[in-house]
Amino acid sequence: MFEARAIESDSKPVFYAELAEQLTSLLHGETDAIANAANTAALLFEMMPDINWAGFYFLRDAQSGDGQELVLGPFQGKAACVRIAIGRGVCGAAVAKRQTMRIEDVHAFADHIACDSASRSELVVPLVKANRVIGVLDLDSPFPARFDADDQAGVEKLAAIYLAASSI
């Protein structure tokens, strides 16, 4: 049985290297994308300091039948927005631009969708497999400028571990 172990390091690169090892161990031998997303979100929420939401959105056919939209997947934190249009909010922008979005102050982001008014900064990593965006890994924090370049690099590596382990 996997058990998360505390990471005692003030160095973010060391923290993320150790967290990557734990995630690799946690997902080892499991290929179900939903189960892996649930465990990934739980591990990040438990281990990362100063975050109030960690989870996934996956691209699905839009309810309107017109294109695709992001639909809420496994997460940890307060209840969240269920559907997000491509290009809307930080998550939708990450999909449209096919790039990580690191927002220091979500209230200054023109098209921010406020699912939790306590969130102040956000880091969204697009999930790209076989050159196709399949969703995003989304982290929120109640602190402005919580995420820096080290966090971005570390979470991008964690997203890659999730993608490599999961059959999508």
Image (cartoon, grey):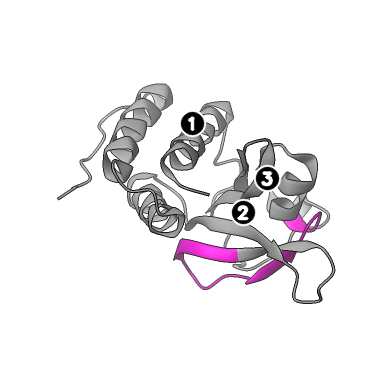
Mark closer to the observer (3, 2)? 3
User: In the depicted view, which residue is nearer to us: 8 or 37?
Assistant: 37
Please tell me how crowded label 3 is: few (under 14), some (14-19), or many (20+) other residues with Cα within 10 Å: some
Q: Distance between the residues labelled 3 and 2?
A: 26 Å
- CB contact under 8 Å: marks 1 and 3: no
Q: How crowded is mark 1: few (under 14 residues within 10 Å), some or many (20 or more)?
A: some
Q: Position of residue 98 (x, y in %)?
A: 74, 39
Numbered circle sitting on residue 120? 2
How far from the left and from the top, in percent, is residue 105? 68, 48
Q: Which residue is drawn at 32% across and 44% down?
A: 27
Q: Is residue 157 toward the left or the right of residue 23 in the image? A: right
- Please report the residue visible at 68 percent of the width from the left and 69 percent of the height from the top: 83
Residue 4 in picture, x, y percent from top left: 23, 45
Task: Please tell me whether mark 3 sits on a helix, a strand or a loop.
Answer: strand
Type of the residue with mark 1: Lys
The residue identified by callout 3 is 133
Residue positioned 49% across, 70% down in the render: 78
Q: Which structural element holds mark 1?
A: helix
Res. 103 visible in picture: no
Query: Quick one: 45 or 69, which is closer to the camera?
Result: 69
